[in-house]
Amino acid sequence: MAEKFNNNPQQDEKFMRMALNEAERALSKREVPIGAVVVAGDRVIGRGYNLVETLMDATAHAEMQAITAAMSTLGGKYLNECTLYVTVEPCVMCGGALAWSQIGRVVYGAPDEKRGYSTYSERIMHPKTEVVKGVLKEECEALMKQFFAGLRK
């Protein structure tokens, strides 16, 4: 799979910043600030942010929104030549959806020790999916801490 993707740290940071912009949109709506973008080549084909509270839908995670948008753009159910950039490690539900989509690559910022897929099993992802961890980790974590600190006031 590595031959399909240019592991370019500058490009990863560029698209993670776009995911952070999506997370800021979630924050502005008092949603848990998680954002995601799906990229094919150098083109964003799907984007999303957490809409769980807005839609009153426990499945309305940023990744799910971005995956659905990307599949609609491509007109198909497989994302094997795409990269998902997400500000926080995907949960088990999102990891399963990413596996079913056969996403080629997942890049995330902050780990989620409580609900991240890797807490349960690294095998949730499709076997050919490349995972890159910790891109803009501090910025992604800071946004989450800001949100949860506001809830505790």
Image (cartoon, rainbow, N blue to C red):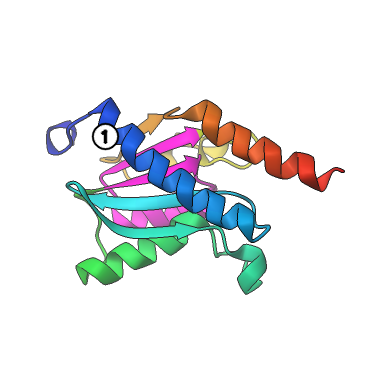
- On the rendered image, what quadrant is the N terminus found in? top left
- On the rendered image, what quadrant is the C terminus found in? top right
Give, as a single range, the part of the protein colored magenta: 83-109
Q: Residue at x 77, y 39 (%)?
A: 149
Residue 111 appears anywhere in the view: no
Location of residue 30 in the rendering, given as x and y in whole percent from the top left corner:
68, 57
Q: Residue at x 56, y 64 (%)?
A: 59
Location of residue 68 in the rendering, given as x and y in whole percent from the top left corner:
37, 66
Q: Nearer the viewer, residue 133 or 126?
A: 133
Q: Is residue 105 positioned above or below 67 on the image?
A: above
Which residue position is annotated with label 1? 11
> Tag 1's secondary structure?
helix
Q: Crowding near pointer 1: few (<14 within 10 Å), some, many (20+)?
A: few
Q: Residue at x 26, y 34 (%)?
A: 11
Which quarter of the picture shows residue 12? top left
Was residue 108 drawn as part of the magenta stretch in this picture?
yes
Q: In the drawing, does residue 74 fall left or right of residue 129?
A: left
Task: Kindly identify the amino acid type of the residue bearing the numbered disc 1.
Answer: Gln
Q: Residue at x 25, y 68 (%)?
A: 73
Location of residue 78 in the rendering, given as x and y in whole percent from the top left corner:
24, 60
Residue 106 appears anywhere in the view: yes
Q: Is residue 86 positioned above or below 58 on the image?
A: above
Location of residue 141 in the rendering, given as x and y in whole percent from the top left corner:
59, 33
Q: How many marks?
A: 1
Looking at this view, name the residue that lies furthest to the left.
3
Was residue 136 drawn as part of the magenta stretch in this picture?
no
